[in-house]
Image (tube, rainbow, N blue to C red):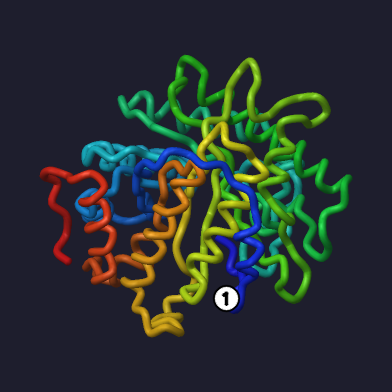
């Protein structure tokens, strides 16, 4: 996720002015992310996934950390443990260093800058087929795949300019790069040998901070850019004869001082650009700074999580919202020893009201 969103005053008035469509109120399934879990011991994985299910989450989100034989085996085991706990699984599939045959430069966040326009799609195809083949051989199902993560940010797709807003030509390069990546991955996923019923979700949009000082390093109004994938050089990367995208990924991070205003502005902007035909999947949501609590109103982290959930519930009466993945388990819901923190109870209470769960008791709160 990107850490350059505004944490001060926000243009709430703009949010109220944006157009949305009324949709029937319903419940969105809650999920919880625990990135990189496959690198942990089996005991930690089991405890984590038991806790996540015990909190009432319907979904679990993570992605593979390597395309190596060991990396694939570790991830297959993680998905096996998740499925044993009756969790739906959203897998994030992003480009990796091993997908490239060109030199990759280190950027200021500590990992290598990778342009999707330069990815070797043959290498990516082999890696993704290897992963899906291993999952299939293990008799496991996956429910959805999010192709990319925050690819509207320079740090996750270096086709986004680092020091200036994207020009028309640069945006076209970005569209072709992400579009080809999405098409390749979605086509493989829905191959009859693999998972033709799995949902296809576009990358979770980072929503970089437009008014912040310094170079943007992100696409302005990323949902508008995603919508442009409907026609890139005459091809529709979102819906075609081979596959149809099932949902649009979005990441919603807010300041604890402006929860309602920031979440409303981002989701309304997304809906206005992308339309009402598919749901917005909130593949990450939460806060950015553990030290920001209590907020200016004196509200605790637990209270702010509740306000966030209430805001999303209100917005669901106006916008079609799919599963909502809280980010993330190990940073915000449990301590270093794996003990669940008090704020985890907010999610448990919420899921109990949404859809009471029987059995599957989780960790102690």
Q: Dot 1 surroundings within 10 Å: few (below 14), some, or many (20 or more)? A: some
SS at mark 1 in the image: loop
- For the point 28% across and 40% down, the residue is 87
**The N terminus, quarter of image:** bottom right
Q: Which residue, given by chain and number where applicable, does mark 1 sit on?
A: 7
Residue closest to the eye, 9 or 58: 9
Q: Give the number of marks.
A: 1
- Asked if residue 120 shows in the view, the reply is yes
Residue closest to the eye, 177 or 96: 177
Residue closest to the eye, 138 or 206: 206
Hey, which quadrant is residue 299 in on the image? Answer: bottom left
- Asked if residue 43 shows in the view, the reply is no
Residue 304 x %, y %: 38, 71
**In this picture, is 18 found above or below 132?**
below
Residue 252 x %, y %: 52, 58
- For the point 74% across and 76% down, the residue is 213
**In this picture, is 127 found above or below 111?**
above
Residue 125 x %, y %: 60, 29
- For the point 46% across and 84% down, the residue is 296
**In this picture, is 138 found above or below 218?**
above
Hey, which quadrant is residue 357 in on the image? Answer: top left
- For the point 38% across and 66% down, the residue is 307
**The C terminus, quarter of image:** bottom left
Residue 133 x %, y %: 44, 25
């Amino acid at each position: 996720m990107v850490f350059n969103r505004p944490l001060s005053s926000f243009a709430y008035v703009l949010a109220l002015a944006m157009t949305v469509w009324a949709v029937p109120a319903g419940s969105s399934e809650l999920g919880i992310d625990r990135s990189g879990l496959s690198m942990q011991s089996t005991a930690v994985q089991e405890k984590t996934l038991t806790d996540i299910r015990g909190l009432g989450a319907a979904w679990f989100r993570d992605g593979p950390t390597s395309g190596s034989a060991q990396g694939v085996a570790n991830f297959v085991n993680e998905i096996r443990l998740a499925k044993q706990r009756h969790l739906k699984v959203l897998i994030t599939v992003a480009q990796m260093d091993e997908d490239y045959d060109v030199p990759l430069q280190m950027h200021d966040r500590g990992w290598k800058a990778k342009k999707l326009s330069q990815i070797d799609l043959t290498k990516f195809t082999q890696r993704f087929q290897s992963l899906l083949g291993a999952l299939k051989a293990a008799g496991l199902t996956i429910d959805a795949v999010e192709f990319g993560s925050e690819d509207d940010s320079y740090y996750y797709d270096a086709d986004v300019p680092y020091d200036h807003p994207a020009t028309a030509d640069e945006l076209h390069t970005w569209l072709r790069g992400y579009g080809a990546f999405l098409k390749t991955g979605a086509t493989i996923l829905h191959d009859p040998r693999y998972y033709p019923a799995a949902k296809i979700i576009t990358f979770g949009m980072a929503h970089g901070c437009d008014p912040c000082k310094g170079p943007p390093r992100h696409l302005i109004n990323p949902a508008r850019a995603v919508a442009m994938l409907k026609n890139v050089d005459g091809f529709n990367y979102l819906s075609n004869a081979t596959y149809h995208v099932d949902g649009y990924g979005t990441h919603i991070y807010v300041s604890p001082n402006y929860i309602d205003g920031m979440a409303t502005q981002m989701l309304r902007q997304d809906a206005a650009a992308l339309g009402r035909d598919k749901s917005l999947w909130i593949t990450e949501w939460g806060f950015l700074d553990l030290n920001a609590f209590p907020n200016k109103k004196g509200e605790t982290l637990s209270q702010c999580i509740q306000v966030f959930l209430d805001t999303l519930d209100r917005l669901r009466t106006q916008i079609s919202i799919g599963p909502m993945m809280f980010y993330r388990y190990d940073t915000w819901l449990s301590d270093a020893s794996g003990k669940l923190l008090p704020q985890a109870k907010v999610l448990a209470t919420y899921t109990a009201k949404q859809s009471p769960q029987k059995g599957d008791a989780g960790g102690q709160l």
